[in-house]
Image: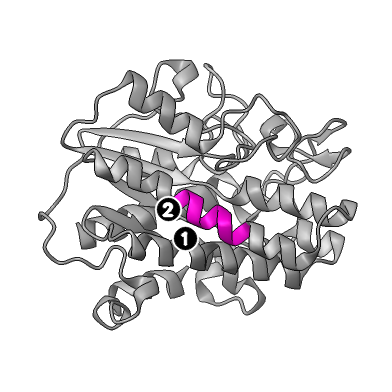
């Protein structure tokens, strides 16, 4: 993740590139302090049911999702809508398409999540919206490639459109005065899932295409004033080269959970580990914090916490 957060030191140079202009504005107010934290997205942001169970990580009672860490560091609370909070994120959700990554047509898309929020809430000064989406779309697209219903090139085109669609959803929130943070996706080509199905190059290419389309569209929409792009991508992207930052994770290739789901699970097929079912009792190793991945796609609590801390620090540096 060190490469990601080197962006702080390089922010002036980075602003020369249109892909980086989102979040580079220097005229925003100093020391933004959110009064409410709101969240939207897919499994990477999902906070589970009313009891906080079913998050796509390890449900061990800890602060185990990056959105919770950001909220906590700002001294704010965040809970799922099911628990009476303002996190609308849903497991396996896609940005605008249905069905979801696991084939469920009833899962609210990010677009629908924002529809619900705007129809039931009034954005107030100090609202901070955290959005993490795209992984559900890429899982669904890969399933189509494996099924032979679309080509690799069509998958990439689909990913580009999803990135643009997400940017336009962010604009809806920005237009009504919310501060918005979006993470994009990390390279799914670096996940145990990609390795298992032999699709590392394709999943890397479509992940990058999604992120690039998202950043360029955000810039084209002129959203640099109150929108920040926090690159969760560079947390997982450098895994092939490692580095001192990653020493804490002794295992970056094997899921720590053994909670196999006979059903659709996380959308990568039946009989796969589903971290939404994972607790402290369903681990392959008690040394949970030495693992990067909870299942073949989603991150462990410690990885989520590190992502959240770095995003919080990045926001404090630039807002």
Q: x%, y% of residue 107?
A: 63, 28
Q: CA distance from mark 1 to mark 2?
A: 6 Å
**Is 280 one of the magenta-colored residues?**
no
The percent coordinates of residue 179 (x first, y second) are: 26, 45
**CB of mark 1 within 8 Å of CB of mark 2?**
yes
| Magenta span | 159-166
Between disc 1 and disc 2, whose residue precedes? 2
**Viewer-proximal residue among 75 and 217:** 217
Q: Is residue 250 above or below residue 243?
A: above
How was the colour assigned to the protein in this rendering?
one colour
Residue for point 73% across, 52% down: 141
Residue found 50% across the figure and 50% down from its top: 165
Examine the rendering and report whether any part of residue 231 can be seen.
Answer: no
Magenta-highlighted stretch: main secondary structure? helix
Task: Answer with left or right where residue 83 lies relative to residue 74.
Answer: right
Q: Is residue 288 left or right of residue 113?
A: right
Which residue is painted at 41% across and 49% down in the image? 168
Q: Which mark is residue 214?
A: 1
Q: Quadrant of the C terminus?
A: bottom left
Residue 187 is situated, as x and y percent measured from the top left of the image, at 62, 64
User: Disc number at residue 167?
Assistant: 2
Q: Residues within 10 Å of mark 2 (few under 14, many from 20)?
A: many
Q: Secondary structure at mark 2?
A: helix
Label 1 SS:
helix
Q: Determine which quarter of the picture holds residue 208.
A: bottom right
Residue 122 seen in the current view? yes
Pick the front one: 87 or 141: 141
Depth check: 287 or 232 in front?
232
234 in relation to 101, above or below = below
Residue drawn at x 85%, y 43% is 269
Residue 153: image tag:
none
């Amino acid at each position: 993740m060190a490469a990601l957060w080197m962006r702080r030191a390089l922010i002036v140079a980075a602003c020369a590139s249109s892909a980086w202009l989102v979040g580079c504005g220097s005229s925003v107010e100093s020391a933004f302090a959110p009064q409410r934290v709101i969240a939207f997205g897919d499994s990477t942001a999902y906070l589970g049911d009313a009891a906080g169970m079913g998050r796509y990580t390890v449900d061990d009672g800890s602060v185990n999702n990056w959105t919770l860490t950001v909220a906590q560091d700002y001294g704010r609370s965040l809970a799922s809508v099911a628990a009476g909070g303002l996190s609308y994120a849903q497991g396996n959700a896609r940005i605008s398409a249905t069905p979801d990554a696991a084939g469920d047509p009833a899962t609210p898309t990010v677009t629908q999540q924002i529809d619900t929020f705007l129809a039931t809430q009034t954005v107030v000064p100090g609202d901070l919206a955290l959005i993490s989406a795209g992984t559900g779309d890429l899982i669904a697209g890969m399933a189509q490639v494996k099924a032979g219903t679309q080509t690799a090139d069509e998958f990439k085109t689909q990913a580009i459109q999803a990135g643009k669609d997400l940017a336009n959803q962010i604009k809806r929130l920005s237009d009504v005065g919310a501060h918005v943070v979006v993470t994009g996706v990390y390279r799914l080509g670096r996940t145990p899932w990609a390795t298992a199905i032999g699709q590392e190059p394709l999943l890397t290419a479509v992940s990058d295409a999604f992120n690039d389309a998202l950043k360029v569209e955000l810039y084209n929409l002129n959203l640099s004033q109150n929108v920040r792009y926090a690159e969760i991508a560079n947390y997982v992207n450098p895994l092939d080269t490692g580095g001192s930052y990653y020493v804490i994770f002794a295992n970056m290739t094997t899921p720590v959970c053994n909670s196999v789901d006979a059903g659709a699970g996380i959308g990568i097929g039946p009989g796969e580990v589903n971290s939404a079912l994972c607790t402290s009792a369903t681990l392959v190793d008690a040394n949970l914090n030495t693992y990067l991945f909870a299942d073949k796609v989603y991150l462990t609590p410690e990885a989520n916490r590190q992502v959240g801390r770095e995003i919080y620090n990045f926001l404090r540096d630039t807002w």
